[in-house]
């Protein structure tokens, strides 16, 4: 019997993760460009969150809330639903962004969604 299995994940798994990560960056880049922000902001840690907060119309200090345990979950969900709203998408699309983010971010990036402006926190007309 061969007991030399090291339990490691194969090369294919890591290649898949790399491809999904690169695709996610490309999608975020395209979403930023659609919103009139520089696409390169998608690859700069922390700054990409500040840029996303600007896109949805939330203050920059919400970034600080993302460092507080449990509060960051609530703030993250609000940001996701606000992102759907500023691109004219429904609450159900927001749930798609929450649970299947790679797919729904690709729909935002490559679909016909138009950026409506930072309408977060404003009453519906």
Image (cartoon, rainbow, N blue to C red):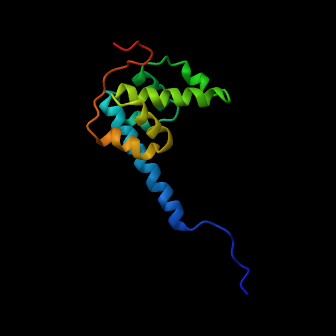
Indicate the quadrant where residue 120 lies: top left
| Count of all numbered marks drawn on residues in the image | 0
107, 1: nearer the viewer: 107
- Residue at the location (42% across, 43% down)? 25
Which image quarter is the N terminus in?
bottom right
**Which residue is most to the front?**
92
- Depicted 43 relative to depicted 125: above or below: below
- Depicted 108 relative to depicted 55: above or below: below
87, 39: nearer the viewer: 87
- Residue at the location (56% across, 26% down)? 75
Residue 73 lies left or right of residue 50; in this view the side is right
**Which residue is most to the bottom?**
1
- Residue at the location (60% across, 31% down)? 73
Q: Position of residue 57 (x, y in %)?
A: 42, 19
Residue 104 lies left or right of residue 73; in this view the side is left
Q: Position of residue 26 (x, y in %)?
A: 37, 44
Q: Position of residue 125 (x, y in %)?
A: 33, 12
- Depicted 21 relative to depicted 30: above or below: below
45, 100: nearer the viewer: 100
Indicate the quadrant where residue 67 lies: top right
Residue 41 lies left or right of residue 65; in this view the side is left
- Residue at the location (30% across, 42% down)? 110
């Amino acid at each position: 019997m061969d007991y030399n299995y090291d339990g490691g994940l194969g090369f294919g798994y890591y290649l898949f993760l790399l491809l999904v990560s690169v695709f996610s960056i490309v999608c975020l880049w395209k979403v930023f460009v659609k919103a009139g922000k520089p696409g390169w902001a998608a690859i700069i840690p922390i700054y990409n969150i500040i840029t996303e907060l600007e896109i949805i119309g939330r203050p920059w200090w919400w970034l600080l809330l993302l460092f507080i345990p449990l509060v960051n979950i609530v703030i993250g969900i609000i940001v996701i639903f606000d992102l759907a709203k500023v691109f004219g998408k429904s609450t159900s699309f927001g749930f798609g962004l929450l649970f299947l983010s790679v797919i729904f971010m690709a729909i935002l990036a490559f679909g016909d969604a138009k950026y409506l402006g930072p309408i977060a926190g404003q009453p519906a007309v």
